[in-house]
Each structure stands twice: as structure tokens, then as C-alpha cells.
Image: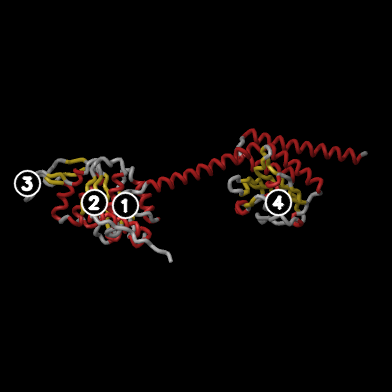
Amino acid sequence: MKRRYRNSMLADVQTERELQLLYHISCLLDTSLDLRNIVSPVLEAMAQYMDMNYGTLALLNRKTGDILIEAAHGLSPQQTRRARYKLGEGVTGQVILTGEPAIIARKSESPILLDKTKRGKAADTSFVCVPIKIGQEVVGALSVDTPHKPKEDLSEDARLLSIVCSLIAQAVKLRRAAQEEREKLEEENARLKHALRERFRPTNIIGTSHEMQAVYDKIAQVSKSNATVLILGETGTGKELVAQAIHYNSDRSDKPFVKAHCAALPEGVIESELFGHVRGAFTGAVADRKGRFELANGGTLFLDEIGDISPAIQIKLLRVLQEREFERIGDTRTIKVNVRLVAATHRNLQEMVAQGKFREDLYYRLNVFPIYVPPLRKRRSDIVLLADFFLQRYAKEQQKPVRRPIQRCD
């Protein structure tokens, strides 16, 4: 009679503790339905009630079929990341596949317990795993490691875990929906970026190689801004074509695109070409003349081979970049301009700065957004496209029909 009374008292105490745990979890759910906010406190409360060593909540990704640990108690972040299952793999995979709980009295005796987290399969440790269901669909699993218990006690643990799973099922549903929505948005973002890369391919440039795609990406990135661009690359790589693509894809596309080849202009002429002059400023100045900066007002000025300008012109160019104003040769009137500058060079301006041949302050004013155009030897996959382009171009000019030879495969 006393034993029966004592057992009844113990059962009442256990029931009271169980009710306290479930009430605590329900309070946590009242504060938030975001699984990230509640799962760690829930596992912590379970650890105190069940005397568990470890606890994990794993979710199934319906799209990939992967089962990943969303939260864990007693495991390091490295151990948590290590655990990844497929449906039917290990105890967790089996529970999620079948929707039936698994009770393992001694972990060391289970052949299907994979222990991917490397927490050990001690003989004095038990393992209980129960499915998390939303309706009839299994969306995850809740599992615990406890010191070894009789099977009756483990069945009680499984029953309690099932109740906890039913309480947090709605939070799990919301969390899974958020994950899937995020993945959907990431996929859509990647698709749109890919579509944009495919769509943005300047018509004046030939090339589909990875190296040229990087150039197209930079053109797309900088075109809509007013940033100064410095185009780098060997002679003949198409730096002027890149400058044109930047201008005609910018908001200045309906304004002038003015070019000046600095290396081709004599030293005594380049200042007049860039900034203009007034009548009588020097011998031969028989009329006022606008310079390239003035002609490009509102649009884009492309200065090719910027590394060849003299130190005196570098000083005047720096002022224009800083103040957006200048004076014509022989004039005292200051002219303000709104010009987007794109410069290009085949020289190594950093080396020239180190050698004192190019002003450091001007270099940093020009090198706001550099674009490197690779030579053809670094994008060999474009050779056939370029050959076809020039073949068709010159065939049309010469009015000569050209046919590709039929390649035979013997």
C-alpha cells in the first residue's frame, strides 16, 4: 500500500513537472513564432527537465531532400554543420521518411545510428527521435540524447517529445516557409542577374568569353553613374569601344561623345585642342575656337593615351577634374562644364607616378573606376567570333559572297 502511494506521488510530481515544461514552452511560443527565437530556449528547457545531454531539431528541405540541423543543444557549431542527412539515411532520415518515432535504448547497439556529429555512441546513452508533423506531412524531427534509461521511461520521453513537436509545429511551418521563400528569391535573383548579363552585351564589342563578360559587367555597373573611368589595356584591345559603350548606355547618351587622342596631338597643340583658344591668343589663332571639353559639355569626353600628356597639361587637366572649370588660351573668362571623363592608356600609370612622370593626384582622380580590357591571347574563345565578324564585314565591303567550308567528319 505504501509503495503504491509512493509511486502515485512520484507520478503526480512527474506530471506536474511535465505540465510546467509544456506551459513554459507555450509561453515561449506566445512571445514569438519565429523558430530562430524559440528553439534554443525550448531545447534548454527540455535539457533541464529530461536531463538530456544533447538535443537537435532537424528540418527537411522539400526541394533538395536534405535534412539539416536547424538548432542544437550541447553541440558546437562545427558539429551542427557536419550533420546532413538524406531521407531514409540514419535514424533521423528514417524517422522523417516513415513518420514513426525511434527509440534506441543503447546507442552503441544501433547499426543505423550514423553519429555524423561525432558526439559518440556510448553504451550508457539512449537516443529518442520523433517526427515533427504538419497535418500528415513530416517536416522535420526532434531528437535527444539522455543517460541510459529503461524502455518504459524512454517511451514516456517519446510521448513528451511528440507533444512538444505538436506545440512548435506552427513555428516550424513558418520557418520552413521563410527558408523556401529565401531560396526562391535567391534563385530568382541569380536568374535575373544571368538574364541581365545576357542582355547587356554592347553591340559594338565582339566577344562572349568569361574575360569579356567581366568587362561587360563593369560597363553595366558604371554606365549610369557620373564616375570617372580609367580604361587599361594593351594597344588594340578596343578601349575606345568600351568608352563608347559606357557613354551610349549612360544617361548622357543623347549628348556628345567627344574623342581626343593625346598621343597623336603635338605638344604645342594639345592644350588648344582640349581647352580651346580665343582669336589672337597665338600665331595662327585667327578665330575663337572651342576645345574638346567645351564641345563635350553635357556628354562624355574620351581621352585616349592619357599617359602621354605633359606635366603642364596634367596640371590643367587636374583643375578641370576638381573644379569643372577652365579658361581658353588667351582668355580670362572662366568656363564651367558638365563633362563625364573617360580616359584610357596602355601605360602603367602607377609606375609612371613612382618615376615622377605622372602626377599622383591626377592619377587618383582618373583611377576612380578602372576597367581592364584583356588582349585577345587571354580570350581565345573569341577568336572565331572576331574572324566571322571581319569576314562578313569585308565581304560586304568588297561585295564578295563568302561561304563557310563544310566540315566533314570521317
Disc with the residue nearer the chain's start (4 vs 1): 4
Disc with the residue nearer the chain's start (3 vs 1): 1
Disc 4 residue type (three-letter): Val
In this view, which residue lies farthest toward the right? 1
- Estimate the spatial distance between the alpha carbons at disc 4 and disc 1, rounded to whole Å: 58 Å
Q: Give the number of the mark in front: 4 or 1.
A: 1
User: How far across and how far down the image is residue 147, in percent?
Assistant: 76, 51
Q: Which residue is mark 3?
A: 286
Per the rendering, the mark at residue 303 is 2
Q: Give the number of the mark in front: 3 or 1.
A: 1
Instruction: Categorize mark 1 by other alpha carbons within 10 Å: few (<14), some (14-19), many (20+).
Output: some
- Estimate the spatial distance between the alpha carbons at disc 4 and disc 2, rounded to whole Å: 69 Å
Per the rendering, the mark at residue 91 is 4
Are circles 4 and 2 on residues that touch, CB within 8 Å?
no
Are circles 4 and 3 on residues that touch, CB within 8 Å?
no
In this view, which residue lies farthest toward the top? 30
- Image quadrant of residue 340? top left
Asked if 360 appears above or below 190 in the picture, the reply is below
Disc with the residue nearer the chain's start (4 vs 2): 4
Disc 4 element: helix
Q: Give the number of the mark in front: 4 or 2.
A: 4
Disc 1 residue type (three-letter): Ile
Q: Residue at x 63, y 46 (%)?
A: 60
Disc with the residue nearer the chain's start (2 vs 1): 1
- Estimate the spatial distance between the alpha carbons at disc 4 and disc 3, rounded to whole Å: 94 Å
Q: Which residue is mark 1?
A: 205
Which quadrant of the figure contains the N terminus? top right
User: How far across and how far down the image is residue 200, in percent?
Assistant: 37, 46
Disc with the residue nearer the chain's start (4 vs 3): 4
Disc 1 element: loop
Disc 2 element: strand
In this view, the residue in front, 258 or 150, is 258
